[in-house]
């Protein structure tokens, strides 16, 4: 990619509806700048530009000891790039094999990094992989892996995105079969590992009052789609320890 093409992408990101400061994106030699530009191009629906930039990042190995005072770590940049490449490939091809490979690698870095993420949701990236396994017809594998993740991650009662998303995934499969009684029990258990805010606790309390299992499940599930509080805080890394 020549400098003229790069600068055109940088200016597009710097002057968009959600402008990014030039000092964060101007240096092509800094792969983190390319990471930001590529991901922002995807937000702007410039898929061609996004994949052109993100492809320059996909083979970079992040420094797992990078813990910046501000902004994203190298590990988080890498994970977000892999996540977005997976979505682009899935959107363009409609196939799941390559996107699953990219999400596998993203999950590897999610689990390897022992410090807090500021923007990426580790559990959601794992959960997206499970969705693509279902789309690929690998339901048995997806269920086995979700059950294993749930069994391992729930051993510690604390905020844990893997425990939460594993239970959410399993509950959704039960609900799809009409077994709302078991599905709602799983979602209730999942919230033991969720970063509940006061608003979240209020919504969950309202859901718990519903007597019909299907309605209670729907209310609990709606809460899973709302970001009430950040998964990870700087003073406590939330990572998979297994």
Image (cartoon, rainbow, N blue to C red):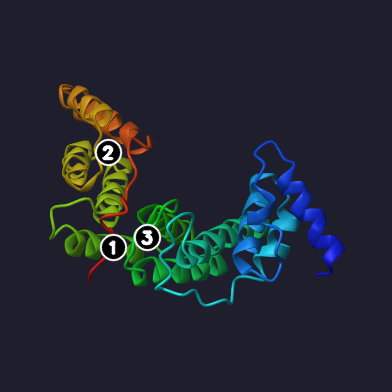
Q: Which residue lies at the image location 20% right of the left edge and 38% below the top edge?
A: 184
Disc 2 designates what residue? 178
Disc 1 designates what residue? 239
Q: Which residue lies at the image location 34% right of the left edge and 32% below the top edge?
A: 222
Is label 3 in contact with label 1 (beta carbons under 8 Å)?
A: no
In space, the residues marked 3 and 2 are separated at their CA atoms by 17 Å
Specify few, some or many for label 1: CA neighbours under 10 Å numbering under 14, 14-19, or 20 or more.
Answer: many
- Placement of 180 over or under 52, stated as above or below: above
Quadrant for the C terminus in the image: bottom left
Residue 220 location (% of width, % of height): 26, 33
- The part of the image, by quadrant, that contains residue 129 is bottom left
In space, the residues marked 2 and 1 are separated at their CA atoms by 33 Å
Earlier in the chain: of badge 2 and badge 1, it is 2
Q: Nearer the viewer, mark 2 or mark 1?
A: 1
- The part of the image, by quadrant, that contains residue 4 is bottom right
The secondary structure type at the circle numbered 1 is loop
The secondary structure type at the circle numbered 3 is helix
Specify few, some or many for label 2: CA neighbours under 10 Å numbering under 14, 14-19, or 20 or more.
Answer: few
Quadrant for the N terminus in the image: bottom right
Specify few, some or many for label 3: CA neighbours under 10 Å numbering under 14, 14-19, or 20 or more.
Answer: some
Looking at the picture, tell me which residue is in the foreground, 184 or 115. 115
Looking at the picture, tell me which residue is in the foreground, 88 or 30. 30
Residue 114 location (% of width, % of height): 32, 68
Disc 3 designates what residue? 139
The secondary structure type at the circle numbered 2 is loop
Residue 145 location (% of width, % of height): 30, 65
Asked whether, in this view, residue 227 is left or right of residue 78, the answer is left
Earlier in the chain: of badge 3 and badge 2, it is 3
């Amino acid at each position: 990619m020549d400098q003229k093409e790069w600068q055109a992408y940088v200016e597009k990101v710097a002057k968009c509806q959600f402008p990014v400061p030039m000092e964060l994106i101007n240096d092509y030699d800094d792969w983190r700048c390319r990471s930001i530009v590529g991901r922002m191009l995807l937000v702007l629906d410039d898929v061609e530009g996004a994949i052109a930039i993100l492809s320059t990042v996909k083979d970079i190995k992040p420094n797992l000891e990078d813990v910046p005072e501000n902004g994203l770590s190298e590990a988080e940049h890498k994970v977000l790039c892999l996540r977005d490449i997976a979505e682009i490939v899935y959107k363009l091809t409609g196939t799941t094999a390559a996107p699953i490979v990219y999400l596998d690698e993203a999950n590897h870095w999610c689990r390897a990094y022992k410090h807090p993420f500021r923007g990426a949701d580790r559990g959601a990236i794992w959960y997206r992989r499970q969705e693509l396994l279902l789309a690929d017809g690998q339901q048995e594998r997806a269920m086995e892996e979700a059950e294993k993740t749930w069994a391992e991650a729930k051993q510690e009662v604390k905020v844990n995105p893997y425990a939460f998303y594993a239970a959410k995934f399993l509950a959704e499969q039960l609900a799809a079969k009409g077994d709302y009684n078991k599905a709602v029990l799983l979602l209730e258990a999942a919230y033991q590992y969720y970063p509940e805010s006061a608003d979240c606790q209020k919504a969950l309390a309202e859901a718990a009052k519903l007597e019909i299992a299907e309605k209670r499940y729907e209310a609990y599930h709606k809460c899973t789609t709302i970001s009430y509080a950040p998964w990870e805080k700087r003073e406590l890394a939330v990572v998979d320890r297994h």
